[in-house]
Image: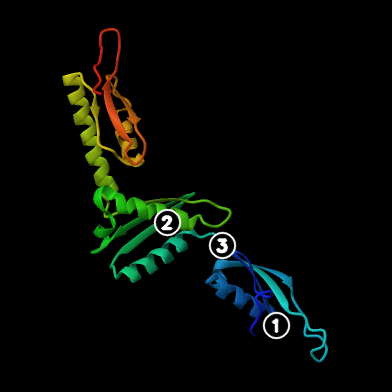
Amino acid sequence: MKLSNDEQRSKTASNYEGIGKTPEEAIEMALKALNATREEVDVEYVDMGSKGFLGIGAKPAIVSVTKRFDPVNMAKGFLREMFATMGFVVTSGIEMNGKYLTIKLSGQDAGALIGKKGQVMDSLQYLLNLIINKGEGTYATVSLDIENYRERRKETLENLAVNLAKKVRTTRRSVRLEPMSSYERRVIHATLQNDKTISTHSEGNDPFRNVVITLKRDKNNKAERTK
């Protein structure tokens, strides 16, 4: 049965009010509109409809179908379509823990999704956050890692922080690091936060915001900062 635009009443991207001769027909219409399976939705029967008498006085069935918030399947679907379009061979591991969605990618083409200093990966993580949280209701925080890049990068930054702190103590001069993402700046700060002789702070505006490592000042120590 082909319905007019007035009959096809869509509320949001995750909710659709379907109309049909029978409740099942109305549900099928809503499922197609939401691109969902029966297992992925909740159904509210607004009006069961009636056949009337000899077709006279017949009323259509109306159902309100809501797509459940499922970040894991949303992420899987988006990544599957993206990899198919790009022709990439990539394996994804996705886990949900509370409100945190962790995605790990690997495979022969995964490295191309990292980019210089992880910039492509950060952009993809940002895009996933937007897609998964574009609806209403529950919010999920996406954390994306590719080929264990973040862990390897974290170790590199921690070693860098320790070595630069030694340099600051030796030269008694501040060191300004190159611009970094907020995640990388947090790694530097966290690595040196318990150092009794060193302090860190960030300066500038993104994407040029960077970390400055300085010698802590006390009565017997007058640190000289670089300009």
Does 152 sit above or below residue 114?
above
Q: CA distance from mark 2 to mark 1?
A: 38 Å
Q: CA distance from mark 2 to mark 3?
A: 18 Å
Which corner quadrant holds the N terminus?
A: bottom right
Q: Give the secondary structure at mark 3.
A: loop
Q: Position of residue 80 (x, y in %)?
A: 38, 67
Does 15 sit above or below residue 159?
below
| Numbered marks: total | 3
Give me the residue at 31% from left, 54% from top.
120
Q: Position of residue 188 (x, y in %)?
A: 29, 34
Kindly indicate the quadrant of the structure image that contains residue 201. Answer: top left
Q: Give the secondary structure at mark 2.
A: helix
Does 153 sit above or below residue 39?
above
Viewer-nearest of discs 2 and 3:
2
Q: Position of residue 118 (x, y in %)?
A: 28, 49
Residue under label 2, please give it: 128
Residue under label 3, please give it: 68
Label 3: how many Cα within 10 Å (few below 14, some 14–19, many 20+): some
Kindly indicate the quadrant of the structure image that contains residue 135. Answer: bottom right
Q: Amino acid at mark 2?
A: Leu
Q: Which label's residue is closer to the chain start, 2 or 1? A: 1
Residue 40 in the figure: left or right of residue 120: right
Does 175 sit above or below residue 148?
above
Which corner quadrant holds the C terminus?
A: top left
Q: Amino acid at mark 3?
A: Arg
Q: Amino acid at mark 1?
A: Lys
Residue 57 in the figure: left or right of residue 146: right
Q: Return the mark for residue 21.
A: 1
Q: Give the secondary structure at mark 1.
A: loop
